[in-house]
Amino acid sequence: MVGQRAAEGRKGGRAGMRLVGGTALAHDDAAVRLDGVGIAFTLKGGKRYVAVEGIDLGVMPGEFVAVVGPTGSGKSTLLNAAAGLLKPAAGSVTVFSSALSGLNARAGYLFQADALMPWKTALDNVAVALEPQKVPRAEALVRAREWLARVGLAAFADRYPHMLSGGQRKRVALAQMLIRDPEILLMDEPFGPLDAQTRQIMGNLLLELWAANRKAVMFVTHDLEEAIALADRVVVLSAGPAAGIVGEFKVDLARPRDISEIRLEPQFHALYKEIWSCLRVEVSRAYAGGPA
Ligand SMILES: Nc1ncnc2c1ncn2[C@@H]1O[C@H](COP(=O)(O)OP(=O)(O)OP(=O)(O)O)[C@@H](O)[C@H]1O
Ligand SMILES: [Mg+2]
């Protein structure tokens, strides 16, 4: 466990290294790394709003990192920076040791909102993800069928999105992201709109697929239980404006994990209590309108 790093954390330790859960991580080994990242938006009338500032965050290959923080703290903003959708005003984004410019081609992105094409079947929605790689259509369809089977939708290949439940649509979206075999997964509250039971089923499915082929994952959620159940490390963002990382906690729970079972473990409760004591302060600040 690392705990709060409000005071010292942003500066890190030795040059190029940072201590995380007792392990010194070489920055250059990270799959994706934000260094001193600051992002500001220009508002109507020309005023600038600094959403996040001084963010140092690396995700190692094969590591599952969850980012939690109050609403409006800048979680999506950070993911967008890692995806190359937003250019930071300060700092840098590095992907496997190369400075990111333009879209992050080594990452797959899963949004909170459905991004399936309503005029395409589940099969075509998955197969279309291979188009940029110029995979021949016949091969793309075979691979898309395999992926639909992996997410438990073999029998639903010919259905259009409106003929699928919310959970089923998320499964299609998951297959659509994973079929390209990206090395980094960027997920923005992907299971947010689902009911609690379906969220757990989706969480277990995600962990199962991830265990079979470990990617670097940056997973944003407002649900602390979900974050702990899934991740190797939980990072806490402060309330904005100029949100920063105020806590970083290693999750030492054994894998494989069953999301519904792991919540019953005493170790889970202890961790939840510890992280919540950090997050709670920020949630209260966010609802009070942020810092003065
Ligand atoms: N395009 C924009 N223009 C101006 N302000 C923006 C823009 N995008 C985001 N913001 C502001 O930046 C802050 C961070 O937004 P962001 O969407 O990253 O928050 P979040 O942590 O993902 O919140 P939520 O949990 O509600 O999804 C918010 O205060 C938001 O109002
Ligand atoms: Mg968001």
Image (spheres, rainbow, N blue to C red):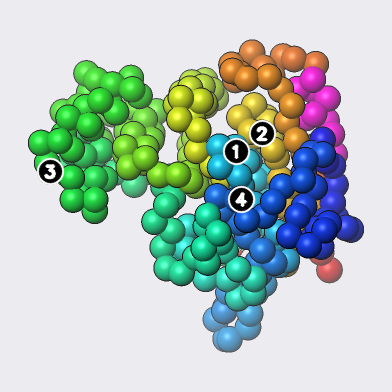
User: Label 3, on which residue?
Assistant: 136
Q: Are marks 2 and 1 in contact (CB under 8 Å)?
A: yes
Which amino acid is tagged 3? Answer: Pro
Which element is circle 3 on?
A: loop
Q: Is residue 262 above or below residue 125?
A: above
Which element is circle 1 on?
A: loop
Mark 1 or mark 4, which is nearer the start of the sequence?
Answer: 4
Which quadrant of the rendered structure holds the N terminus?
Answer: top right
Nearest-to-viewer mark from 2 and 4: 4
Describe residue 83's horizontal placement relative to residue 32 as left or right.
Answer: left
Q: Is residue 233 above or below residue 196?
A: below
In this picture, which residue range is highlighted in magenta?
A: 267-277
User: Label 2, on which residue?
Assistant: 232
Which amino acid is tagged 4? Answer: Asp
Q: Mark 4 and mark 1: span between their CA atoms?
A: 12 Å
Mark 1 or mark 2, which is nearer the start of the sequence?
Answer: 1
Q: Which mark is residue 63?
A: 1
